[in-house]
Structure formats: C-alpha cells, structure tokens
Amino acid sequence: MKIQGSSKAGIAALMVVLSLSGCHKTAVADEDPQERKPLPAPFFEGLPLSGNLATARKAGFGACLDGTKGMRCRKEGVMVMGVGPLSAAVDLDAAPIEAPARFDHVTLWHATDQGAVLDLGERLKNADWQSCLTPDEERYLHLPSPVRIAIDTNYWGIRRVVISAPPPAAKTYC
C-alpha cells in the first residue's frame, strides 16, 4: 500500500502530537500553588533559607500574616548554635498568581535582649567563620558554604540576624 504525501504529513503530525502529549505537566484544578511540594532548599541549623509556603510550614513556621507586599510566617523558640531562644520569620514575596510566593532568607531576633544575637557572632568566629564590618552590619561567611549571615550593628528597634544562601555573585560578600 502506497501512502500519498498529504497522508504522510498527517501521520507525521499525529506522531509528533502523540509523542509530545506526555512531555508536559498538567495542572490540577484544585491544587493550591502555595501548597505544592517544596523544592529542596538550603538549610542552616534546621532553618530553611529559601523555599515556598510549604517549605516554611514543613519547618514549623506558622502564624502567617498576609500583608500588601507578601506574607510573614513566624516560629518561636529557635536555637542557633546554642544561642536563643530566638524568634524567627520568613518573608514570602507577593508573587504572580501563577507562581507560588517564595522566600530567600530567614530573619532572627530576640524581642527583649538586643545583645542575645551578638552571642551568635562570637560562636561563628569561634567556629572559624570569616567576618567583616559594613556601616550597618557584621557579615559572616564560611567558604565554601553558600550560607551568609548578617548581624545588625546599627539598629533602631530590634537587632536582627539575617541568614541566607544566595547564588554566587560577582561582588564579594566580605
């Protein structure tokens, strides 16, 4: 049996469509993008340094407050390198509807003792972390780890610690 040219093209097009049909993920209509399974995230002392709402909840962050620019989820009683208990928060950005909101750092503080987080700086130095001063913070890094820690030196209210694991940048951290 001989297949004519237009039939060959039709069969080829059908084969392409059939082969591509399994190559994409279809969205589930009832699936909340905020609740999707979290992607692997970098952690420091049990704290997630990036992720989505599901990542934060899985790590014990709750009491989430929705604001105009995003959402803040908190966790109390956090210990970092033996320092604490501290309060911790992740700030999820306001993302487009199609994409889940994400966070890229965790913030720590002590509500009544501004010096409590300074103990963390001493522990980092004793663990051979490099440090440098900027006008507003003391920064810590421990190569080759991507983790970056900044402790406020200039503050107006509550002294904060910000822990992140940003991608490599051209500009040096310290």
Image (cartoon, helix red, strand yellow):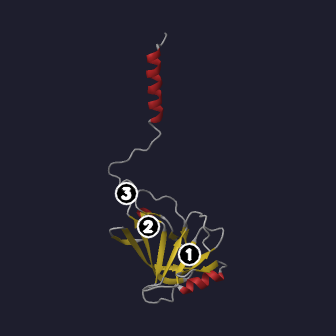
Q: Amino acid at mark 1?
A: Ile
Which label belongs to residue 87?
Answer: none
Q: Earlier in the sequence, mark 3 or mark 2?
A: 2
Q: Earlier in the sequence, mark 3 or mark 1?
A: 3
The answer to whether residue 139 is left or right of residue 9 is right
Q: Which residue is mark 2?
A: 56
Vertical comparison of 168 with 98: above or below: below
Q: Which residue is mark 3?
A: 96
Vertical comparison of 58 with 23: above or below: below
The secondary structure type at the circle numbered 3 is: loop
The alpha-carbon separation of the residues under discs 1 and 2 comes to 19 Å
The alpha-carbon separation of the residues under discs 3 and 2 comes to 19 Å
Q: Amino acid at mark 2?
A: Ala
**1 and 2 marks in contact (CB < 8 Å):** no
The alpha-carbon separation of the residues under discs 3 and 1 comes to 29 Å
Q: Counting other residues with Cα less than 10 Å from the Cα at mark 1, is it few (<14), some (14-19), or many (20 or more)? A: many
Whole-percent x, y for residue 44 in the image? 55, 71
Q: Which residue is mark 1?
A: 149
Whole-percent x, y for residue 105 in the image? 49, 70
